[in-house]
Every structure is written in structure tokens, then in C-alpha cells.
Image (cartoon, helix red, strand yellow):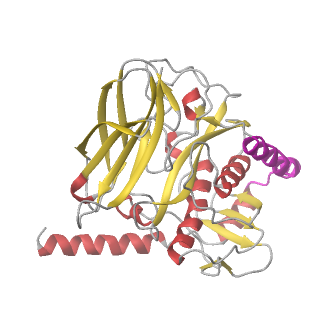
Amino acid sequence: MNDDERMVEALRGALDEQAALLEPGDRLDEILATARPSRSAWATSWWLPLAAAAAVVAVVTGVWLGLPDGSDPVPASSDLPLPTSSPLTSPSAGPTTTPSAGPTDSGAPSPTSTASTPAPTAGTPVALPVYYVATIGDDARMARLYREWLTVPGVTRQADDRLRARTAIELAMAAVPPGTDGYLRTWDGVELVDVAVTDSRITITLSGPGGTAFPEDTERVSVQQLVWTAQAAVGRGTIPVRFVLADGSEAIFGTQPVDRAYNRPASRDLYHYDLAPIWVNSPTRGQELGSGPVTVTGEAQVYEATVSWQLLREGDVLDEGFVTASDGAASRGTYEIDLGTLSPGAYAIRVYEPSAEDGEKVSAETTMPFSVR
């Protein structure tokens, strides 16, 4: 990269960072409310917290469903970055299964299998994209976001924005999706009081500011966790998110002020500020695949676009190698790993980036358990 290219890249990054700080003016809420008053929304709002609470209770007591059951996901356009294929058109993994316990890290949308996808119906549970905070490699100080796709009984495509957002945020704050053991519990002691959604703003009311036990950047990412989750669950783009603390505090975790709006980074090239460098999008966590070739797909933002991988069975390495992502370094690219045809059984795919310093430490990694029937 020559000096001119470096200058262009620096200017681009600076403009993106400034654009991320922009938000619609407060008058828009008032104008929209005046132009489109909704008595029905007010009349039905009292039962939504109860419905969301019931859905979360169902999840906590063990009724977890993952995307591989062929459930109807929130439209792909609701979540960024977009998967390489949409769950609406990708083959499903067949019958509903409860994800099995396995290693920590991410999950995301594109199941791969030989079964056909049933047409979604209004009563089909909707798969909610939920973000979780975890460390990304050997440096325990560096935490970023991983995405899981979760369905909750009673939350369907007919559910309104507020119910989907409230349910997804509750799941994010619980930090206990199935088959994981490494997500950080940064929201212990904090309760979700309410969520309000308009065309110009999502407002999240929390019971209090939370603790101060985590590094400041982990606290920042934890706030972004709720931003990404709320925006994805609502499914109407990057609506700015505001926070209110019911106890009157002025900063979440004591470091993240509530007198400003929050949003995702302005471009994919800046997503590394929030998202883990490596995701596995397919297979999803605990997914049972049919017979036939197995292909792993995901996203990566790694040095020289080099993605290393290991296929594991009961902790043993069965195969390993590396692939090249579509983009590297400053950009977030996609990758694909062809594992061939696997015999029936339980597996895990580990995708990682060796440290550029010595090749022994790991800069970033994720492990996704799955099985073949």
C-alpha cells in the first residue's frame, strides 16, 4: 500500500467513525407520534412484559431451540453483517433438536444439510439473533461479540418489534445459551425494565448501571451487545439506541454515559471494534447434519486473510488445514471449509488465527459443535 492509499484509508476510517456518531433529531419522534397515533398499541402494551418474561422463563428452564429445526428466522436484512446465505433459502437440518453441550463461542445463521426447508408460517417460532460477549483468543483482556440464533416458544413472526426486542435482550443479558461455557456475565445484578421502539429510536431501560469489575473496553462491548441484539431483533436497520437507568445513574458500568445514542460501527471495515474476528455461520451450534459432504462457512477479519482450522472428535484432531478468506486485514471477509463426507457421530470445528508474533499463541478462535447422522 503506497502513501496515497494509506491516506485514503485513514480518511475513510475517520469519516466512518464520525458518521457512526450521527443520530436523528428528537423532533422526529414527536412528529411521528402526532402523525400516526396508535390506540391499539397502547391498549395491548400492558401484557407484553408478561409475555416476554414467560418466554425467557421457558428458555431458562431448558426449552431452548436452535435454528437447525427449520424455524422461521428474522429476515436476513434485519441483521448485519449479512450471512453468505439466508436461512430462509438454505436447507434446514430436519427435525427439531436441543443443542448439545460443547465448547464456547459463536453461532449464526446458515444451516447446511440435504433436507428441504418447509415454507414458514405465521405461527412458526422466529429465530432471534442474539449477541454474546466472550474473549477472542489467548488475551483475556480482549472481548468481542459472537452471535447465536435462538428460538423461544411463543415468539413468532406475528410478534411485534417490542416483544422480539425484549425477548432477545433478556437472552443476551442472561449469557447462558446452550452448549457454551465461555460467555461473560457482565449484566449480573441488572434487570431489563422496559424496551420502547419507534421508527427513529430504540430505548432500553435497565434497573441500574451494573458493576465495575470488567475492563472498560469489555464494558463498552457489553453495551454494544444490547445495541446489536436490539437492532437485529427489531429488524429495521440501524435505529439509534438510547439507554435509561431506572435508578437515576448517569453511566452504565460507571463508564458508558446514557446521555448519548449508541449504534453499530458505520461500516463493515470498522466491525472489528465490536465483533469477534472469527465466526462460524454454518453449521450452527449443535446442528445435526444429514449424510453427504459437509461445508463450514463463516466470517473472518484476520491477518493476510488466512484462516486456520481443525476438525475435532472427542477432543482429537481428525483433520486440519487453512483457507483464505475473501478479504483480509482491515476488511471482514467470508470463508468456506470443505470437510468432505463424514461418518455419523459428534464433531466440532475449531477455526482460529495463530498469533503473528510467534505462531504458537492464538489471536482469535471459535469452536462450533455439530453432529452427523
Q: Total number of numbered labels? A: 0
| x 69%, y 64%: residue | 203
| 241 relative position to 287: left or right | right
Compare residues 244 and 253 and report the one nearer the observer.
253
| x 25%, y 56%: residue | 328
Give coordinates of residue 237: x percent, y percent: 53, 53
Judge whether residue 56 is colored magenta.
Answer: yes
| x 23%, y 67%: residue | 357
Give coordinates of residue 218: x percent, y percent: 53, 70
The picture quadrant where one finds residue 249 is bottom right
Compare residues 267 and 317 and report the one nearer the observer.
317
Give coordinates of residue 284: x percent, y percent: 49, 37
Give coordinates of residue 244: x percent, y percent: 72, 72
The answer, for residue 361, to whether it is visible in the render is: yes
| x 45%, y 65%: residue | 265
The answer, for residue 90, to whether it is visible in the render is: no
Q: Residue furthest left?
A: 2
The picture quadrant where one finds residue 250 is bottom right
Q: Which residues are magenta?
A: 36-61
Secondary structure predominantly adopted by residues drawn in magenta: helix
Say if 58 sits above or below 341 in the image.
Answer: below
Compare residues 4 and 307 and report the one nearer the observer.
307
| 355 relative position to 348: left or right | left
The picture quadrant where one finds residue 18 is bottom left
Judge whether residue 41 is colored magenta.
Answer: yes
Which quadrant does the N terminus fall into?
A: bottom left
